[in-house]
């Protein structure tokens, strides 16, 4: 039996990108590793690397018995469905399965597409392996735990929920050998945990991965780093966890173990401003941390409180200063158009950027993604005009409006933040400039 896993590009029918994709798709790589351990031949096709369009996938799927398509990112859904149709036309006997974050929350809508046979719900390693075993035995995947299919009337129906992976170390490391790691801008992507206890209203991570945080052991993390360094000559590791510093003792343990290991790497991570302090940042810097992604989202305390972000704006300013003094680069992330935000609030965020002086800006506009409270309780949050066009659910294209900001206001706010960042960059090149 032959299995093909497909990671779609961001948009339907897109030409090859001018820049390399950021990082390898760990989700399909984890699933592929479990399949290989069970003895299934599997290949992974990352369209972000190849520059392929959906019709091009058909040739690769012509002899596949099972095709899994990663439907995690909402903006890729048009491409996912297009891929499924082309696969079915080229190989009608292939079983086509979608999975991932978006697919989990929107499976009834996805199963309206005749080319989609089933949807894996939640974490995919055990579920997709179960599907593969059933297909190999000539059975349909419909009664498997964690799988949604169509019943005899054509209506979407889901089987019993499958428990999340309790022991992450029981999973084999991602099958990085099935991906062209050298084609990525940041090939050293490592996941050390799953789950998020915070439940921000604009995010579906806690709904998908659960609020209980499950972690890889320090030994497992170091083993993956050693493989990246030894087999792929990768000396720059990026941890993909939403909040790498959630557990201060664990970070201290990791830093000590990394130092004792003799591994010559530098590393970066993402975290929240309320889970770091000067002492911890100093230890991280000494252990090789060179960049931190900080999700601030807005400089309006009222807006942050309204979306259950649970951080303090003043504390956020302090964290950027601490990082600057220690020589840690910062990426500041903001979302324009959060519930209750106004253009005046965006101006305050732009002023925050000028004062915090991050090294990199990551700005996006509000997207009411499936599985998020802002979508499920849109009226309560003042979210209006949610687009049905999933291709608009990308960083810069407004997919909704709010009671306090129109779509045009959101666009203007997005530009404001980038203009503020341009001032910061200009002042960095010319220290005598007028940026605060």
Image (cartoon, rainbow, N blue to C red):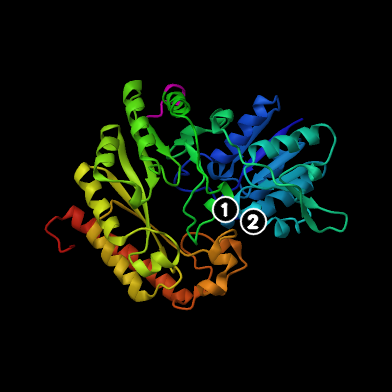
Q: Pointer 1: what residue?
A: 207
Name the N-terminal-most of marks 1 and 2. Answer: 2
Query: Where in the figure is residue 202, as x and y percent of width and height?
Result: 49, 61
Residue in view at x 62 percent, y 41 percent: 164
Q: Pointer 2: what residue?
A: 105
Visible residue check, residue 262:
no
Query: Where in the figure is residue 381, as x and y percent of width and height?
Result: 51, 72
Front in this rendered view, residue 19 or 276: 276
Q: Nearer the viewer, mark 1 or mark 2?
A: 1
Query: Where in the figure is residue 225, as x and y percent of width and height?
Result: 43, 28
Question: Quadrant of residue 124 in the image?
Answer: top right
Which residue ends up furthest to the left in the rendered image?
Answer: 432
The C terminus sits in image quarter: bottom left
Tag 1 secondary structure: helix
Residue in view at x 47 percent, y 77 percent: 406
Residues at discs 1 and 2 in contact (Cβ within 8 Å): yes
Residue in view at x 37 percent, y 50 percent: 272
Apparent side of residue 15 relative to residue 89 in the rendered image (left or right): left
Q: Which residues are magenta?
A: 230-235
């Amino acid at each position: 039996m032959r299995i093909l896993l497909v990671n779609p590009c961001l948009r339907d029918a897109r030409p090859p990108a001018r820049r390399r994709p950021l990082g390898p798709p760990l989700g399909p790589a984890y699933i592929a590793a479990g399949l290989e351990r069970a003895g299934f031949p599997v290949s992974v096709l990352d369209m972000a690397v190849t520059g392929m369009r959906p019709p091009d996938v058909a040739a690769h799927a012509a002899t596949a018995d099972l095709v899994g398509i990663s439907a995690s990112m909402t903006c890729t859904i048009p491409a996912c469905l297009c891929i499924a149709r082309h696969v079915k036309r080229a190989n009608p006997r292939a079983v086509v399965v979608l999975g991932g974050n978006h697919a989990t929350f929107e499976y009834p809508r996805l199963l309206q597409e005749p080319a989609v046979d089933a949807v894996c719900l939640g974490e995919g390693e055990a579920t997709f392996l179960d599907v593969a075993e059933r297909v190999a035995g000539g059975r349909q995947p419909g009664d498997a735990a964690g799988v949604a299919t169509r019943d005899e009337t054509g209506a979407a129906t889901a089987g019993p929920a499958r428990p999340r992976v309790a022991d992450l170390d029981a999973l084999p490391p991602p099958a990085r050998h099935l991906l062209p790691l050298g084609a990525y801008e940041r090939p050293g992507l490592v996941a050390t945990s799953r789950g998020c206890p915070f439940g921000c209203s604009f995010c579906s991570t806690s709904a998908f991965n659960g609020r209980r945080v499950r972690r890889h052991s320090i030994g497992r993390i170091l083993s993956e780093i050693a493989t990246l360094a030894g087999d792929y000559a990768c000396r720059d590791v990026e941890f993909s966890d939403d909040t790498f510093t959630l557990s201060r003792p664990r970070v201290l343990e990791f830093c000590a173990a990394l130092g004792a290991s003799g591994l010559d790497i530098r590393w970066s991570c993402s975290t929240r401003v309320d889970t770091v302090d000067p002492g911890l940042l100093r230890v991280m810097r000494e252990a090789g941390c060179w960049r931190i992604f900080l999700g601030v989202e807005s400089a309006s305390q009222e807006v942050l409180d309204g979306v259950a972000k649970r951080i303090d704006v003043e504390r956020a300013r302090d964290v950027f200063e601490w990082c600057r003094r220690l020589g840690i680069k910062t990426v500041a992330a903001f979302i324009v158009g959060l519930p209750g935000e106004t253009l005046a609030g965006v101006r305050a965020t732009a002023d925050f950027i000028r004062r915090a002086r991050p090294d990199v800006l990551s700005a996006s506009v509000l997207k009411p993604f499936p599985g998020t409270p802002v979508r499920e309780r849109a009226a309560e949050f003042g979210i209006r005009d949610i687009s049905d066009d999933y291709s608009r659910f990308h960083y810069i294209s407004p997919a909704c409006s709010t009671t306090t900001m129109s779509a045009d206001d959101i666009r203007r706010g997005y530009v404001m933040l980038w203009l503020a960042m341009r001032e910061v960059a200009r002042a960095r090149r010319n220290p005598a400039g007028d940026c605060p």
